[in-house]
């Protein structure tokens, strides 16, 4: 197995969309497909990968806007993974209407995430990430820890010197801070944090410099 991460910054917010692929098998997943789905699919083709799954850290609209289009680009359509506590957001187009927007309604999740679950890129592939439930930004927010690469796909839980907002339904500051301390800061300092927005960081840097987490 020869794992590789591709990061794309897309859309008006902008969002970080990630591909996690295996150069040996050609299997890959897309994490938090936001806008510009055609660009994502072109990047997959350029990498000579085949998408197998869509993994969502959470169901806010800017992280799921491309899920429907990308899922339907394949036959059969790609399974979408989501934590059940974010189903209400998912069924409401991720809350796009709250911001005067609309997105393509994504397909029903076919993969239900649980804390501690281990995921492979495809059915016959060994696990490559561990699911870590990290509520606070949303009730069903999860992160994906890839020990082999030393990276944590952390969505909107933590940013470089920042944290996710907690003022939307299902958000709670104390819960988010607990998630960061238990599910992020428990990892090795050198672990790279790959967030949903902005530049990457490391666990060690955030432990020392993040002003929101004492």
Image (cartoon, rainbow, N blue to C red):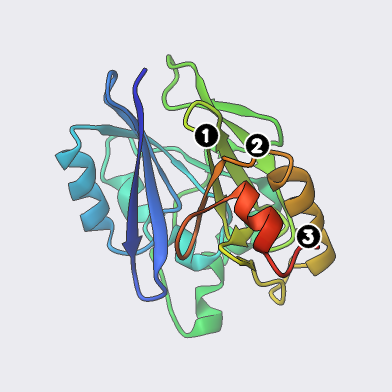
Q: CA distance from mark 1 to mark 2?
A: 9 Å
For the point 70% across and 54% down, which residue is it?
207
Identity of the residue drawn at 56% across and 58% down: 59
Q: Residues within 10 Å of mark 3 (few under 14, many from 20)?
A: many
* Residue position marked by numbered label 2 in the rendering: 188
Q: Is residue 51 above or below residue 164?
A: above
Residues at circles 1 and 2 in contact by the CB criterion of under 8 Å: yes
Circle 2 crowding by C-alpha within 10 Å: few under 14, some 14–19, many from 20: few
- Residue 122 percent coordinates (x, y): 42, 23
- Depth check: give the residue in front, 77 or 12: 12
Residue 183 x %, y %: 72, 44
Q: Position of residue 32 (x, y in %)?
A: 45, 53
Residue 97, image x, y percentages: 51, 79
The answer for how far apart the CA atoms under marks 3 and 2 are is 18 Å
Q: In what element is the residue under mark 2?
A: loop
- Is residue 19 left or right of 56 when viewed as pictured? left
Rendered residue at 28%/18% (across/down): 24
Label drawn at residue 150: 1
- The answer to whether mark 1 and mark 3 are in CB contact below 8 A is no
Residue, disc 3: 177
Quadrant of the drawing holding the N terminus: top left
Horizontal placement of 108 versus 4: left or right?
right
Front label number (3 vs 2): 2
Instruction: Give the mark, 1 or 2, whose residue is nearer the N terminus.
Output: 1
Label 1 – label 3 distance at C-alpha: 22 Å
Q: Earlier in the sequence, mark 1 or mark 3?
A: 1
Residue 7 higher or lower than 105, as above or below: above
Disc 1 element: loop
Q: Nearer the viewer, residue 91 or 25?
A: 25
Query: In the rendered view of the protein, which quadrant contains the C terminus?
Result: bottom right
138 shown above or below 82: below
In the rendered structure, find residue 98 and report the number of the disc placed on it: none
């Amino acid at each position: 197995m020869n794992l590789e991460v591709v990061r794309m910054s897309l859309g008006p917010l902008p969002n970080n969309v990630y591909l996690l692929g295996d150069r040996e098998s050609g299997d890959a997943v897309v994490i938090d497909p936001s806008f510009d789905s055609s660009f994502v699919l072109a990047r997959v083709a350029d990498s000579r990968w085949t998408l197998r799954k869509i993994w969502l850290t959470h169901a806010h609209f800017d992280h799921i806007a491309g899920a429907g289009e990308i899922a339907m680009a394949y036959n059969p359509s790609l399974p979408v993974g989501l934590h059940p506590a974010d189903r209400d957001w998912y069924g409401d187009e991720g809350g796009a209407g709250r911001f005067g927007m609309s997105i393509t309604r994504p397909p029903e999740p076919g993969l239900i995430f649980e804390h501690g679950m281990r995921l492979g890129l495809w059915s016959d592939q060994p696990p490559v990430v561990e699911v870590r439930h990290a509520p606070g930004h949303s009730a069903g927010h999860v992160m994906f820890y890839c020990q082999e690469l030393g990276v944590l796909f952390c969505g909107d839980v933590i940013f470089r010197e920042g944290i996710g907002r907690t003022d939307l339904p299902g958000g709670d500051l104390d819960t988010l801070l607990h998630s960061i301390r238990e599910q992020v800061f428990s990892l090795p300092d050198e672990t790279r944090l790959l967030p949903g927005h902005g530049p990457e960081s490391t666990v060690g840097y955030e432990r020392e410099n993040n002003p929101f987490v004492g």
